[in-house]
Image (tube, rainbow, N blue to C red):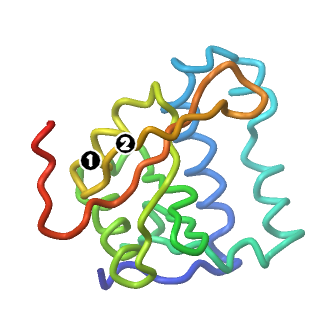
Amino acid sequence: MNHIRKSTLQDISRIAEILIFTKRMSYRFIFRDDKVSFGEMQVLPLAQEYLAAPEKLEQIWVYDDAFVKGMIHIEGARIEELYVDSFFQNEGIGGELVDFAIEEFDVNYLYVLEKNKQAIRFYKAHGFEVTAERCPEPGTEEFIVRMERRPAGRSNAAG
């Protein structure tokens, strides 16, 4: 976890780039709305949002190994966002970010799109399980589900 540090103003460009491109890759097949994916979601406006409100960076931590490869946004005991640049996925970066959030902030829950099976598998592999809580994703026809961290020592026998 020696690559994880608090985000700074200098990270805004990479954070915005990771968020936009990874969200496009992860959600396009779910939402099927190219007007949003390629029209509304843009790197520069997102970076400008962070520049205009740098306090948003207070809850963001980055995985920096020569440059920023991933980010995690933590709100209290919740993982708000976790994204790893598509080029560096499957290298353990996301796992390190989750472990950091658990160890440093005792995070114990998050919300994920119900159709995002890849994210659900990832979080299950890192000790979270889907709960019965399910609600609409605002402004869409999709649903999000709550995932909670399993108590230590309890395995996920259900698979």
Which quarter of the rendering shows the C terminus?
top left
Residue 4, placed above or below residue 129: below
Name the spot of residue 62 as percent of width and height, x first. Answer: 49, 71
Q: Is residue 64 visible?
A: no
The image position of residue 64, as x and y in percent, is: 42, 73
Gap in Å between the C-alphas at discs 1 and 2? 8 Å
Q: Is residue 69 left or right of residue 19?
A: left
Which residue is found at the position 31% from the left and 47% from the top?
129
Tell me which corner region of the image, top left, top right, bottom left or bottom right, holds residue 55.
bottom right
User: Looking at this view, is 143 or 51 the one in front?
Assistant: 143
| Position in image of residue 153 (x %, y %) | 12, 67
Kind of residue at badge 2: Val
Q: Residues within 10 Å of mark 2 (few under 14, many from 20)?
A: many
Name the mark on residue 124: 1
From the viewer's perspective, tell me whether residue 137 is left or right of residue 112. right
- Name the residue tied to disc 2: 130
Task: Give the position of the N terminus as an image quadrant.
Answer: bottom left
Q: Is mark 1 on a helix, strand or loop?
A: helix
Identify the residue at horizontal 72%, vertical 47% (top origin).
43
Instruction: Bin the neighbour count of mark 1 within 10 Å (Cα to Cα): few under 14, some 14-19, many 20 and up.
Output: some
